[in-house]
Image: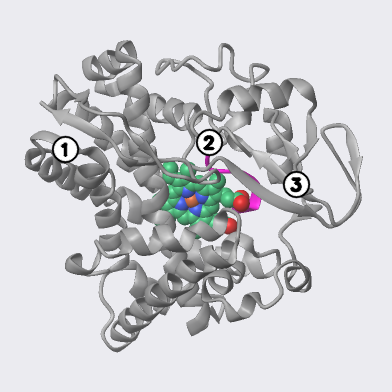
Amino acid sequence: MEGREDPYPRYRRLREISPLVRADDGALVVTRHADCVAVTRDPRLGHMPSHMIDFVSPGWRDHPALRQLFTSILTMNPPDHTRLRRLISSSFTARRVQALRPRIAEMVGDLLVRMSGEVDFIEAFAFPLPVNVIGELLGVPEPDRAQFQGLVRDWTQVLEIITPEVLATADPAATTIREYLSGLAAERRRKPADDLISALVLAEEDGDKLTDDELLTMAGLLFAAGFETTTNLLGNGLVALLRNPDQLALLRKDSGLAPGAVEELLRYDSPVQLLSRVAWDDVEIAGVRISGGERIVAYLGAGNRDPERFPDPDRLDLTRSDNAPLSFGGGIHYCVGAPLARLEAQIALPALVTHFPELAFVGEPEQRDSLAIRGYTKIPISAA
Ligand code: HEM
């Protein structure tokens, strides 16, 4: 789809034309809020079983980037999904996340005092904060973390359109990430520490454990999802605030607005713009009967701007009530890391805007050339 820079006018047109549109690649696209919710919750929709992936992407098992995606919890179906989700939930608990609050506040404070003059917000803050939070949670030593920015960006290109060129960079990146985590897991097996990798090594539910392969795939997904999307929540959030100074002023005056403000920023410019599913059976979506085997893409970014659900949807309003965004998905695949991403942004954004009373752009933000993941590669600001 075109319109990557500002997809919202295009989403609006799509929503107005028809609730269900066939895209150039044959997928059926839904853009209305209620239909996006239905797509995430309908048990007759799921991910491609492996025989179907064999058909669509022959040889995927020989590509580390695809193998790591297609064998992960993100693209798995019940009962395998249920089993892995239970094991991860027992390690990635709300308590483990809440316990990070003081440490996140400390990291935010450290990053803010180091920022001065003209800086790139992504490099100086939006990347280092989440990568250090998830790195510390997982147990990835500090000096090793920075290399993962490029590696994860290369690997996650497979969430866009998969071409031989994409695979040529995504495969080595996926291999490097996996080899690194394999070394780390081996260390923790010998000597467990108080971190998530050790918890995954030891995780057990009713006698069930993660296999070595499952553990590495899970750790890789948690690490990648743990910073890539949150970097974009902070980046997209700051851009939206700077472009809406009245709203920025509100947050600066009252940090108590942070929880609702973060929901509104997620709604307004979601770091994950779409998710896709396959119909396992004939099913009705958006009032249209569609056949088993069809691929359906739900544009979360479009559903988040549906006027049927959110009045005056193109307006950023940090005080909006009833603004639960679609941005973390829904149903059985609802984002595992949502509480962590929310906590980081709720601490970081008010601290940022109060620390720098004259925060401003000093150049045009540069956008990442991708559609499924929406974010910026550079946001030049003056930190004053
Ligand atoms: C603003 C930040 C984030 C956004 C917008 C986001 C968005 C999403 C979405 C939309 C899904 C569902 C995908 C689908 O149904 O196809 C998802 C799943 C997932 N997310 Fe996040 N995420 C964020 C942060 C995180 C963080 C911080 C972590 C880990 C620490 C994480 C880990 C995961 C995992 C493991 C899944 C797969 C869950 C499953 O399939 O059962 N995410 N995320």
Kindly state the secondary structure of the residue where label 1 is placed: strand
- Label 1 sits on what residue type? Val
- Residue 228 visible in this rendered orientation of the protein: yes
Please tell me whether mark 3 or mark 2 is closer to you in this view. Answer: 2
Residue 121 in percent (x, y) is at: 23, 38
Mark 2 CB near ligand 1 (8 Å cut): no
Nearer to us of marks 1 and 3 is: 1
Decide: is 57 above or below 2.
Answer: below
> Considering only vertical position in the picture, is 374 above or below 253?
below
Residue under label 3: 296
Q: Residues within 10 Å of mark 3 (few under 14, many from 20)?
A: many
**Which quadrant: the C terminus?**
top left
Q: Which residue is mark 2?
A: 4
Q: CA distance from mark 1 to mark 3?
A: 41 Å
The disc placed on residue 143 is none
151 vs 140, left or right, is right
Q: Give residue 174's position: percent from left, percent from top.
A: 45, 72
Q: Amino acid at mark 3?
A: Ile
Q: Who comes first in sequence, dot 1 or dot 3?
A: 1
What is the magenta range?
327-336
x and y, in percent, of residue 102 in the image: 19, 46
Q: Amino acid at mark 2?
A: Arg
Position of 3 compared to 200: left or right?
right
Write down the residue under mark 1.
Answer: 119
